[in-house]
Amino acid sequence: MSKVKVSVVGVGHLGKIHAKLWKTIENAELVGIYDVNENASKAIAKELNCRVFSSIDEVIKNSDAVTISSDTKTHFSIAKKMIENNIHSFIEKPITSNYKESQKLLEIANKNKVLVQVGHVERFNPALTALKEHNLQPLFIEVHRLSQFKTRATDVSVIHDLMIHDIDIILWLVKSKVQKIEANGVAILTETPDIANARITFENGAIANLTASRISASPMRKLRIFQKNAYFSIDLGNQQVDIFKLLNEEPDPEKYPLAFNLGSILETNNPKNIIYLKPAIMKLNAIQEEQKSFINSIKNNIQTAVTAKEAAEAVRIAEIITNKIAKYNKNILQL
């Protein structure tokens, strides 16, 4: 079976990682890279033994698929041209700078029957995928995504840079329409919010509280899920999960071989056992896993794991949060 010829457009910090990992993916061949910084392109191409393309047109001529990891503001124009030329496109998050562009891109992809996958990489974090075997029905979600300040990625706010990961996660987990959004944030080191908080209420009653910061002293990527009879604590950064569950009976050792019984509570004369689970997590490279998934979708002509439609909805919510923060700050200044 022939390999999918893949190129990378934009070889900054993340693009360089993508290019290196494409060399490890079965059924994929890294054929070349393109970046407006020709010197950077040449250095990476030499290291990876691939071509340096001089234009987007040359990328199109030599590729079956492409990773677009250029600046967010360029995503729409590059992806549009790729899709119109039937090049399957993996687009780093956010899919585009704004919702209008993402909707247009979705229309073009559907019209041309081209596969689009978006780099919401946390979907492939083994700490999160480990929860698939559990019956998740979130009622309250608390998320903290904190990062130390870096000069890269400051072309967008912390909402589109960091929080959008968690917007995608909660939309994926809750699977209900958003009913209400409250948000606030502050621009401290840049012209756009560097720290932000959003409270999102869903039609099914679930609530998610998201905090994102790119000016933290120490990094954190933690997700806590609360639901009836269960609590899940997910450390996305260290790929660890802690689970507490309330059971009506003694835990089945075959079903819960690693369970610790933490005692019981009495509820209407019906004792319930509290158990603690610490699933064994196989450490994986999430970017590598999303690349494998993208190639699998191309080879089998199936829907991608993170669709353009889902990514567009994440951008829509991010825009609402951004606008709420702008309104909040305007009101504060008028006090």
Image (cartoon, rainbow, N blue to C red):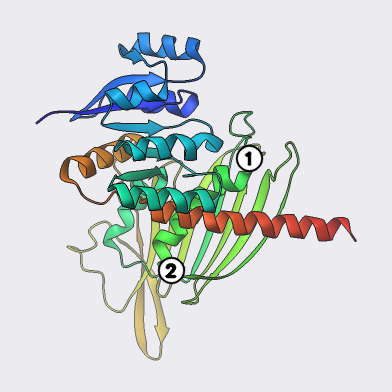
Element type at mark 2: loop
Say above or below: 257 vs 304: below
Say above or below: 39 vs 189: above
- For mark 2, what is the residue? 138
**How many numbered discs?**
2
- For mark 1, what is the residue? 214
Please name whichever residue, 34 or 125, is drawn nearer the observer in this view of the structure.
Answer: 34
Relative placement, left or right, of 288 versus 121 is left
x and y percentages locating residue 238 in the rendered image: 43, 41
Q: Residue at x 43, y 48 (%)?
A: 105
Q: Quadrant of residue 59?
A: top left
Kindly give the residue lying farthest to the left in the view shown: 1
Q: CA distance from mark 2 to mark 1?
A: 27 Å
Relative placement, left or right, of 237 versus 250 is right
Please name whichever residue, 147 or 8, is drawn nearer the observer in this view of the structure.
Answer: 8
Kindly give the residue lying farthest to the bottom in the view shown: 268
Please name whichever residue, 36 or 287, is drawn nearer the observer in this view of the structure.
Answer: 36
Amino acid at circle 2 = Pro
Relative placement, left or right, of 331 versus 169 is right
Amino acid at circle 1 = Arg
x and y percentages locating residue 214 in the rendered image: 63, 40
Q: Is residue 321 visible?
A: yes
Say above or below: 6 vs 122: above
Please name whichever residue, 326 or 168, is drawn nearer the observer in this view of the structure.
Answer: 326
Instruction: Of the two numbered discs 2 and 1 on the same chain, state the one appearing first in sequence.
Output: 2
Say above or below: 255 vs 194: below
x and y percentages locating residue 327 in the rendered image: 75, 59
Q: Residue at x 34, y 87 (%)?
A: 270
